[in-house]
Each structure stands twice: as C-alpha cells, then as structure tokens.
Amino acid sequence: MSPSTAIALVLALALAQYASAAGPRVIIVGAGMSGISAGKRLSDAGITDLLILEATDHIGGRMHKQNFAGINVEVGANWVEGVNGDKMNPIWPYRQLHAQAQELPL
C-alpha cells in the first residue's frame, strides 16, 4: 500500500468515526509541533474530545534524530531541505530574508 493510500484510508476511517455520535469532535491532522500544540491548547480549554492523526511512525513532524557516524544528530525543523530541485521549498525565500536581516547593522 502506498503512503498516500494509507493516509487516505486513515483519514476516511477518522472521518467515519467523526460522523458517528461517539466520535471525536475535533480532528487534528499531523502530530508535528503545530498539531501537538493545537491538541494541548484545546485540551487546556476543556475540549478533550479530539483525535490527532499522524501519517508517519513517529510524532514530532520534521523534528527527529538521525544517527550519523554513531552519533545522534538533531535534524528536521532547523533544516531547510529541497532547495536544489525542480520544486523549491516554500520556506527557502524566508530563510534568505532572515539571513539578510541578520547582516543588517542595528
């Protein structure tokens, strides 16, 4: 089963559960920092009938560790990937602006 098929299946099952009276009132797509933060804020506000869906085998989104030469290296949220292909990462222009702003005298 392809990853996109698996995601579609999980979403369909979640939506079917949501349609039933016993299903969650809120579905959060993605267990990255934004999804986890949204779930926490909703829970703090008293909305606990929620479901967080994640397509990968771990939570944290792009934040994770990678073993490199026997050492765990933090990768993910602080890395901007996909800047040399046909499709540029939409974050890259903002990263360039940030780098230019850091060079400005205050």
Image (spheres, grey):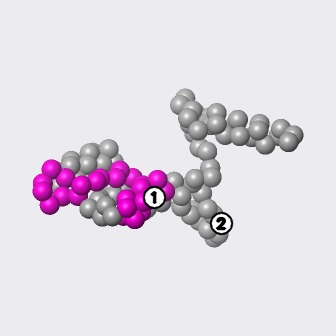
Q: Does 105 sit above or below residue 1?
A: above
Label 1 neighbour load within 10 Å: few <14, some 14-19, many 20+: few
Q: Does 57 sit above or below residue 99?
A: below
* Number of dots carrying numbers: 2
In terms of depth relative to the viewer, which is nearer, 11 or 34? 34
Q: Position of residue 83 (x, y in %)?
A: 61, 36
Residue occupying the point 87% across, 40% down: 105
Label 2 neighbour load within 10 Å: few <14, some 14-19, many 20+: few
Q: Quadrant of residue 106?
A: top right
Q: Earlier in the sequence, mark 1 or mark 2?
A: 1
Q: Position of residue 57 (x, y in %)?
A: 39, 61
Q: Is residue 94 left or right of residue 7?
A: right
**SS for dot 1:** helix
Residue occupying the point 61% across, 68% down: 72
**Residue tagged 2:** 69
**Does residue 35 belong to the magenta stretch?**
yes
Q: Is residue 87 left or right of residue 25?
A: right
**SS for dot 2:** loop
Q: Quadrant of residue 39?
A: bottom left
The Cα–Cα distance between marks 1 and 2, rounded to whole angstroms, is: 33 Å
Q: Is residue 65 left or right of residue 3?
A: right
Residue occupying the point 40% across, 65% down: 44
| Residues in magenta, as a range | 18-45
The amino acid sitting under disc 1 is Ser
**Does residue 16 belong to the magenta stretch?**
no
The amino acid sitting under disc 2 is Ala
Query: Residue most toward the left?
Result: 21
**Residue tagged 1:** 37
Residue occupying the point 67% across, 40% down: 95
